[in-house]
Image: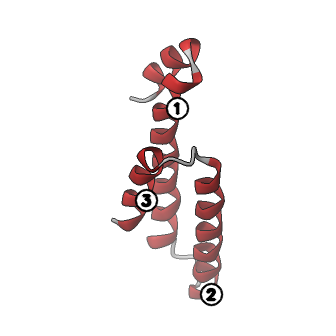
């Protein structure tokens, strides 16, 4: 679970909490991509393409909000490549 360590770390410092926040960020990206890759029966191919484009835009925006360090960004980028 991520929430326990995140709560404890956030009391001490942002630096200590940041890796836990990145893990939550990654979990969110997995959930969102799963919904696009394995859409519900009601989603048409056109709406799936629109959702995929939105997801890519969101990922780009979220990556820009992370600390500009490869140590922090590499796990996100590796997840996206897999």
Question: In percent of the image, x 51 and y 76: which residue is there?
Answer: 41
Q: Are marks 3 and 1 in contact (CB under 8 Å)?
A: no
N-terminal-most mark, 3 or 1: 1
Q: Mark 2 sits on what residue?
A: 46
Quadrant hosting residue 60? bottom right
Q: Mark 2 against mark 3, which lies toward the viewer? A: 3
Q: Please tell me how crowded label 2 is: few (under 14), some (14-19), or many (20+) other residues with Cα within 10 Å.
A: few
Q: Mark 1 sits on what residue?
A: 18
The one nearer the camera, 82 or 65, is: 65
x and y percent of residue 64 in the render? Answer: 63, 55
Provide the secondary structure element on which disc 1 rests: helix
Q: Please tell me how crowded label 3 is: few (under 14), some (14-19), or many (20+) other residues with Cα within 10 Å.
A: some
The correct choice, above or below, for 37 with respect to 77 in the image is below
The one nearer the camera, 65 or 2, is: 65
x and y percent of residue 17 in the render? Answer: 52, 26
Question: In percent of the image, x 62 and y 87: which residue is there?
Answer: 46
Provide the secondary structure element on which disc 3 rests: helix
x and y percent of residue 24 in the render? Answer: 49, 40
Q: Mark 1 against mark 2, which lies toward the viewer? A: 1
Distance CA(mark 3)–CA(mark 1): 17 Å
Q: Mark 3 sits on what residue?
A: 77
Question: In percent of the image, x 41 and y 53: which residue is there?
Answer: 74
N-terminal-most mark, 1 or 2: 1
Quadrant hosting residue 12? top right
Q: Residue furthest bottom?
A: 46
N-terminal-most mark, 2 or 3: 2
The correct choice, above or below, for 72 with respect to 52 in the image is above
């Amino acid at each position: 679970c991520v929430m326990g360590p995140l709560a404890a770390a956030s009391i001490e410092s942002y630096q200590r909490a940041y890796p836990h926040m990145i893990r939550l960020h990654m979990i969110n990206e997995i959930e969102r991509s799963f919904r696009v890759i394995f859409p519900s029966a009601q989603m048409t191919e056109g709406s799936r393409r629109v959702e995929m484009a939105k997801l890519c835009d969101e990922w780009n925006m979220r990556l820009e909000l992370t600390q500009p360090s490869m140590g922090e960004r590499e796990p996100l980028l590796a997840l996206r490549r897999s």
